[in-house]
Image (cartoon, helix red, strand yellow):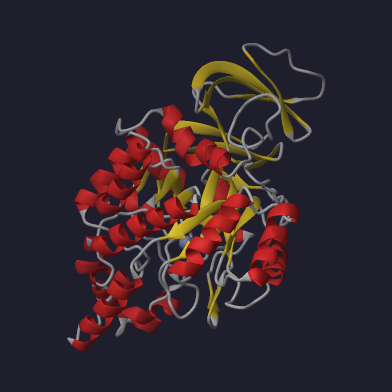
Amino acid sequence: MKILIQNGLVVNADGSAKSDVLIEGGSIKAVETSITPPEGCRIIDAEGLLVIPGGIDPHTHLEMPVGDIRTADGFEDGGKAALSGGTTMVIDFVNPLRGQSYLEAYGQWMERAKKATCNYSFHVTVTWFNEEAAKEIALLAKEHGVNSFKHFTTYRDTIMLEQGKMIESFNFIAKLGCLCTVHAENDEIITYLQKKLLREGLTHPKGHALSRPPVAEAEATNRAIALAEVAEAPIYIVHLSSGGALNAVRAAQRRGQEVYAESLCGHLVLDDSVYFDNPREKAARYVMSPPYRSPEHLDALWKGVADEAIQVIGSDNCTFTQANRNRGLHDFTKIPNGSPGIEDRMRILWDRGVRSKRISAEQFVAATSTNAARIFNIYPQKGAVKPGSDADIVLWNPEKEHHVSSTTHRHAIDYSVFEGFTFTGSPEITILNGEVVFEKDELNVAAGAGKFVPRPPRW
Ligand SMILES: [Zn+2]
């Protein structure tokens, strides 16, 4: 399939220009001011539209098992939600059980992802670390296209790695040329506050926010950065949500330490009133970690996105049905954690970022695609509209209004945390691997059309 996109404004992270874009065989053949249409190609008029690299969502949990339930959005419907919002690739997470073979867990996730409708890749969580684990981690890096490994400072019973092991893991992974990522919240603070609140009779979902205060995140972020410094490892903080944690990142960046930060689209638009001003059932929908924060933290995050202390915006798409949420209506610690976002991530950043004059269109492209491609070492194959790049492209209409409703969204859950919001700026057409897969608000994509994207070590 050959496609010629004419008259659009091509926006890359490093600049914008009115250009035609020729696509052939799944990749971009040419980006020039005027291209003569080759024989038999489809011509798309992109007058008034932006031609941008397909979004890369670096943080999703599709079809993730948690105890006896799983996240509702799978690789097929979750991928469709992504494509309809302009995201053509996700980096999801393999979470091995403690002691489980890393390669076995990786195989399980690869099997689930076979029906993916968008392109995908995997981070792997380090849930246990010793010589045996190190051998498997090295194989994942050298032979299976994994160049990023996640570490948790909380969830002691399941996936937390204690600090001594974390330093060893950081150092080992850095030597493989791979990137360590961290979920940073102080486990002791959270456990102490959870017990205290429940003892005092506070069982409402707002206890979730009260038990995970900003200081728990700031402390653990600081600590993770310190461990990474000692381990001589670059570090990437996932879902950074508060001003104190951002200060820790800024201080490290100023010292010249290689520290990256990702924030989530939801944290840029929702605040903690969702817990305090809602009855149990509705408040439970917003339970995710870190929790939504008070407005001054949203201001801090936007400042970080604008001055690029925060490089990447993800979604942490991790959806549970209302029935799943209701398990914890009278004990907030039993509510499964997570939030949707894969579908609206780019709209949120355009509407609240570019239209609100907080960031430029180029910064929007950087934060939704290019920076993730660079940091996770798949640039310029992904994250660019340039000759030779893969043809994952979005024709973005900066004026198109999108009304969010659980009756029309493509998530497999029966509510939306963005219910009633209108975001201006939305895709007209999404092109995946050189094929039009979303057009006129309809998807035309087969299960399995998404391709695995291996990511080589960074050095
Ligand atoms: Zn997550």
Q: Give percent across and percent down for residue 396.
A: 51, 33
In the picture, the quarter occupied by the N terminus is top right
- The residue most toward the right is 39
Q: Is residue 138 above or below residue 27?
A: below
- The image quadrant that residue 377 belongs to is top right
Question: Is 377 on the left or on the right of 435, as rendered?
Answer: left
- Is residue 196 among what the camera can see? yes
Is there any visible trace of residue 281 in the rendered image? no
Q: Nearer the viewer, residue 86 or 400?
A: 86
Picture coordinates of residue 331 (x, y %)? 31, 84
Compared with 292, 202 (above or below) is: below
> Residue 74: x and y, percent?
60, 64
Q: Position of residue 54 (x, y in %)?
A: 58, 38
Q: Nearer the viewer, residue 141 or 358?
A: 141
Q: Residue at x 68, y 24 (%)?
A: 387
Quarter placement of the C terminus: top right
455 up-or-down from 324: above or below = above
